Image (cartoon, rainbow, N blue to C red):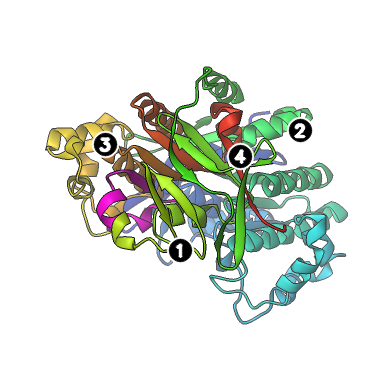
Amino acid sequence: MTPPVFDIAIRDGRRVLVDVAGFPLAPKQISILFGESGIGKSLIGKALFGMADTEALHVRVNGEGYAEYRSRPQSVEWRRDGFFVFQEPSTHFNPLLTLNEQIREGDLEGAPSHLGVIQELWPDKDVLPLSAILKIYPSPFRPSGGEKQRILAGMAFEKMDLTAADQRRSGGLFVFDEPTGSLDREARNRFLDRLILRYRRSRVTVLLITHDYSMIGYLRQRHADLGTALHFLELARRDGGQQVSVFSPKRYFAWIESRRPSPSHPTPPFLTVESGLSVFGKTYRFTRHGERADLQVGSGELVYLKAGSGIGKTTVVKIVMGLQKAERFRMVIGGVRLGEVSPLRYWKHSLWGKKVTMAFQHADEALNPHATVEDSLAILPAATVKTRDQRVHVLSLLFDAHSVSGVMAKKVWQLSGGQKQRLNLLRAFALSTPLTILDEPLNALDFESIGRVITLIEEEQRSGHGILLISHNEDIFDTIVPPERVYQLEVAGQ
């Protein structure tokens, strides 16, 4: 049976935000929508659910006004019996009520077990921390993003349980907008398993919006029996609008296989960070193959530092960059030994942009929102971006050639999240330092851009430059990074 399709047009004044034709949403099945950040995936989800902001946006669905669309029986049923999990959970939570009070609001008041459902998204050992978290008045900074994501997802699961228990609720739409963006792989997989479990019981309509292409591998491995009930879609920019297409799992698996590394030989370390560094009262250690080891990156090597979400990977690499003071640490970089008493001016004058560069997890940390894209490159002390032609060439490495001229004149604040991330990475690669640190380099990117970024990483390696990366995209980097160059970050005593 061919699923219903939707033509969705969304404007902000004169600006077209979404213009997509034939968006398929299979009833009582699971659709997973990929695509770069800022392309319009969230707006599509909100429009279909019936919760687009009509005060700020002009929305049409299948050629009719939004009020007419929202009043249709299917739309009413989707909202009444469904749930929307926001990309930023703070959008949902009321800072004047504890989380414990909010998980019992509205329809969820009749759910049989509040804490039990949410607890399924926490490891067994963390029962007490969850009960403490639920006493908190939520704010942008507490509890953590990953904790709020799991609580909101748990509330959606409660609504699914109510649907499964009452056949009159069988028509709900459940939209999960980036529900695992702040979760490590273990927590993500726990979420996916619980989502599939409840889908099997309730057979509701699910739209899951994500950047995480590695979900494909896990779902195909653990839940292959879902077969045609599982749909993978990708949204991409085409001719001034968006186009949705089927994304083939075979394409993803073939690409992963093609990236398996050839045998290589170790090189003398350019960077060594001793295990046992301390910051914020915690002592961190590195392990490799389960054994304690110092973290080392040699010339031309790609090294992968892994840890659970919130453990402290970004903190550790910021210590290496001199951006975070440590209570105790020892490292050698380019033959120079540094520690917690080393002056910041050494990093500023001798390391930054000369021996080491970092692409931050959040592009806004590194970009001036009021600069143009071209100026963001021109300001770099790099021979590769001195002329306009050189800057055009650099941008074409991650931007389509036909869009480069238009992008160059834009202010950074005008870029989408995916475009900012590509500019962020290009600035780091343009400096071409002996060591580059990449913090979540695949965040906010579509599949084509992910492939281009991996190609740039490989080119840096061939140039003899070392790469240290941290990422939640374990399925990808566990494939392309040799096991002997994979380190685990742990907190001593935990």
Question: Looking at the image, is mark 4 or mark 3 earlier in the sequence?
Answer: 4
Q: Marks 4/1: CA distance? A: 26 Å
Q: Position of residue 382 (x, y in %)?
A: 20, 41
Q: Name the front one of labels 1 and 3.
A: 3
Three-letter code, disc 4? Ile
Residue 32: mark: 4
Question: Looking at the image, is mark 2 or mark 4 earlier in the sequence?
Answer: 4
* Residue that badge 1 annotates: 54
Residue at 45%, 57% in the rendered image: 319
Three-letter code, disc 2? Arg
Q: Position of residue 429 (x, y in %)?
A: 32, 38
Q: Is residue 388 left or right of residue 282?
A: left
Magenta segment boundaries in residue numbering: 348-368
| Image height of 251 relative to 190, above or below | above
Secondary structure, mark 3, is helix
Q: Is residue 366 magenta?
A: yes
Three-letter code, disc 3? Leu
Classed neighbour count for the residue bearing mark 1: other residues with Cα under 10 Å, few (<14), some (14–19), many (≥20): some
Question: Looking at the image, is mark 1 or mark 3 earlier in the sequence?
Answer: 1
User: Where the C terminus falls, by quadrant?
Assistant: bottom right
Classed neighbour count for the residue bearing mark 4: other residues with Cα under 10 Å, few (<14), some (14–19), many (≥20): many
Residue 395: mark: 3
Question: Looking at the image, is mark 2 or mark 3 earlier in the sequence?
Answer: 2
Residue 459 makes an appearance in the image: yes
Q: Marks 2/3: CA distance? A: 39 Å
* Residue that badge 2 annotates: 222
